[in-house]
Amino acid sequence: SDCLQSSDLTRTDFLVDTDYFMAVAVLSAQRSKDPNTQVGACLVNQDNKIVGTGHNCMPNDCEGKLPWNREGAKLDTKYIYVCHAELNAIVNASANADVKGCTMYVTLFPCNECTKLIIQAGLKEVVYLCDKYHKTPETKASKKMLDMAGILEYERFDSIKSDKNISVRCAWEENFFYSEKNHKLPSKHRVHNDVMGNSQTNSQILPLTAAAHLHHGKPPPALQVKIEQQDR
Ligand SMILES: O=c1ccn([C@H]2C[C@H](O)[C@@H](COP(=O)(O)O)O2)c(=O)[nH]1
């Protein structure tokens, strides 16, 4: 009966591992200085331990000296300089750990360059949150390579696995409500487009829990996944 009593006291609304790892990726994304898209990655080994995190940033000692522009001559845009979140997570982890067999939790589907790195580093799984560039050749190439590599599985972060997963997804998607387009609408009519492109209204969204705590109950700072930027 002692056993029963102690099990009665067990918390049931704890943060499950997958939610925690994605929440760490979401939090890492917020370290990014990219004004348009913040990406975070969290690398987890086979013992379920975090071995590295990363966000998109300029190379060491170049921060503040290189442009964050999206448009213009190639040398004047961020694209040619920025270190992607996945690269940073792998490099950060590699200093102290073996990344082979790790799972990457990442807020944005990896681009083709990151996918090459992910495959060559021997990662076994990619769990992603947002696939806003799914129509681009880069993302299509990524999926092609991941499929070919076989050893890798990739799956979208799934709100079905646990209730908490939903809250982490909402944290990301919440920024839709703060996009200029939606902001002008009365709260319950604001359109919510989830990462798969399904639309819902605000009233259908479950309340933020885990992620809201990360943000001290306030909506998360804009993660800038804007509907109008889905097609590049
Ligand atoms: O797999 C990826 C793809 C992109 N990023 C980074 C690189 C840039 O800083 C942004 C993308 O900027 P947009 O303005 O949305 O084009 O995301 C990454 O870290 N990992």
Image (spheres, rainbow, N blue to C red):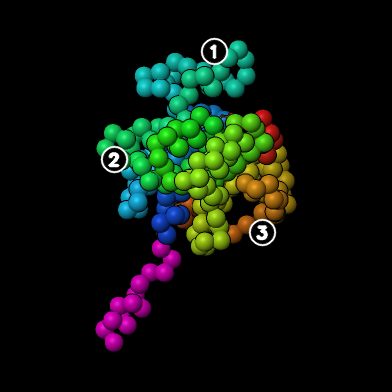
Q: Secondary structure at mark 2?
A: loop
- Of residues 21 and 112, the one nearer the viewer is 112
Instruction: Tell me what residue is drawn at x 66 percent, y 59 percent.
Output: 204
| Residue at which label 1 appears | 75
| Residue at which label 3 appears | 204
Q: Is residue 152 above or below residue 12?
A: above
- Does residue 143 appear left or right of residue 65 in this picture? right
User: Is 5 contained in the magenta span?
Assistant: yes
Instruction: Tell me what residue is drawn at x 45 percent, y 37 percent.
Output: 119
What amino acid type is highlighted by mark number 1? Leu
Q: From mark 2 to mark 3, how far is it between C-alphas?
A: 42 Å
Mark 2 residue CB less than 8 A from any atom of ligand 1? no
The answer to the question of whether label 2 and label 3 lie on touching residues, with beta carbons closer than 8 A, is: no
The residue segment tinted magenta is 1-15
Q: Which dot, 2 or 3, sits closer to the camera?
A: 2
| Residue at which label 2 appears | 97
Sequence-wise, the earlier of marks 2 and 3 is 2
What amino acid type is highlighted by mark number 3? Gln
Residue 65 point in image, percent of width and height? 44, 15
What amino acid type is highlighted by mark number 2? Ala
Q: Tag 1: Cα neighbours inside 10 Å, few (<14), some, or many (≥20)?
A: few
Does the rendering let one see residue 35?
yes
